[in-house]
Every structure is written in C-alpha cells, then in structure tokens.
Image (tube, rainbow, N blue to C red):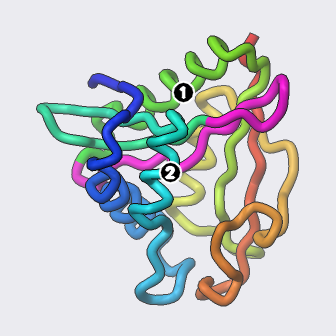
Amino acid sequence: MRVDVITDAATATAAADVINRAYAAGERGLWRDGVRRITPEAVAAAIRAGELLGASADGRLAGCARVWPVDATTSEIGLISVDPDAWGGGAGRALVAAGEARMRAAGATTAQLHLLVPAGRAHPDKERLRAWYLRLGYAVVRTAPFEEVASHGADDLAMPCAFLVFRKPLA
C-alpha cells in the first residue's frame, strides 16, 4: 500500500467518489437519502492546500485522508475513507500512519480526529471505527455537538448525531 500527498486537482472527482462511497457505507442510516459527505470542489481545495493523502493499491485510489493544523501543537486527520471494496486491506491503517508522520514532521505533538455517531444509540460501523481508533492509540476526550464540527446542516441528518473527539499524543 502506497500513501502519497495528492497533488493533481484533476483527481478531485475520483477522490470525492471514494470518500463518498466509504462514508455512505459506514454511515448508513445517519444521513437523509441523497446527501453526499463532500463535493469534488471541497476535495480540490484540500488538494490545492496540500492536505489530502491518497492510498493506492494496484494503481488505483483505495482511500483518502485529509491532514491539517488545528493550532501550533495539534493537527487533525479527517476524511479517513477507504473504498468499501478495499476494507480490511490495510489502506486505513496506512493512511493514519502517514497522516501522523506528516503531523510529526510539521511539529505537532497531538493528533486529533472526529467520529460522527448517532445520539443515544449504537451504530455497528461507528462502534467498529471507535474500537479501531482506540486500538490505534486514540482516546475520546469529549463529545462535540454536531453543529460545532459539521460542514453540513443538521437538517441533512436522518437522526440526531454528535461527534466524538479523539486525541493521541504523537511524542
């Protein structure tokens, strides 16, 4: 599995498709029908900013993650997404490891990520991801209201949701 910074904005549509397919599979039932998590234009902006990582396997894009600074010591990794056809193949782990390496290289001492979860009930894919992040050394530090983090309006949700905020020391 190879992970590189995506530099060609022409790949934004393909990257947005991978991200949206991954989130559609992993967040089934949380969003109203037809809501897409990200547009190709937003992906192109992340590419132009040098923030989007791509995991490639067999010459095709298997997954993406976005890494950006939050403050002088903390960086965020988000949009962690793997094509559902490639789940379990190591792309997610490779993306997180590459993202953390970029954070360290930029001087960050703390990694942060968010996980959307339904309020007051379990979601099997979200429970799987929560356990995976814990195994990777992340810890839940708080729950954030949906509106604090989301790029969508709450009216796009099919049910009330919030974000778990995870952090991990990078030292």
Q: Which residue is mark 1?
A: 99
- Residue flagged by tag 2: what amino acid is it? Ala
| Relative to 21, 36 lies left or right | right
Say few, some or many: other residues with alpha carbon within 10 Å of mark 2 (under 14 / 14 to 19 / 20 or more): some
Quarter-of-image position of residue 134: top right
Quick check: is 72 in the magenta stretch?
Answer: yes
| Relative to 164, 17 lies left or right | left
Q: Which residue is mark 2?
A: 45
Quick check: is 124 in the magenta stretch?
Answer: no
Mark number for residue 74?
Answer: none
What is the distance, in whole Å, between disc 1 and disc 2 at their CAs? 18 Å
Relative to 154, residue 85 above or below: above
- Of mark 1 and mark 2, the one earlier in the sequence is 2
Q: Residue at x 47, y 41 (%)?
A: 48
Say few, some or many: other residues with alpha carbon within 10 Å of mark 1 (under 14 / 14 to 19 / 20 or more): many
Q: Which quadrant is the N terminus positioned in?
A: top left
- On the image, the x and y values in percent for residue 144 come to 84, 60
- On the image, the x and y values in percent for residue 136 come to 60, 28
- On the image, the x and y values in percent for residue 42 come to 50, 59
Circle 1 sits in a helix, a strand or a loop, which is it? Answer: helix
Circle 2 sits in a helix, a strand or a loop, which is it? Answer: helix
The span shown in magenta is: 68-85
- Residue flagged by tag 1: what amino acid is it? Gly
Relative to 121, residue 32 above or below: below
Q: Give the prevailing secondary structure in the magenta stretch.
A: strand
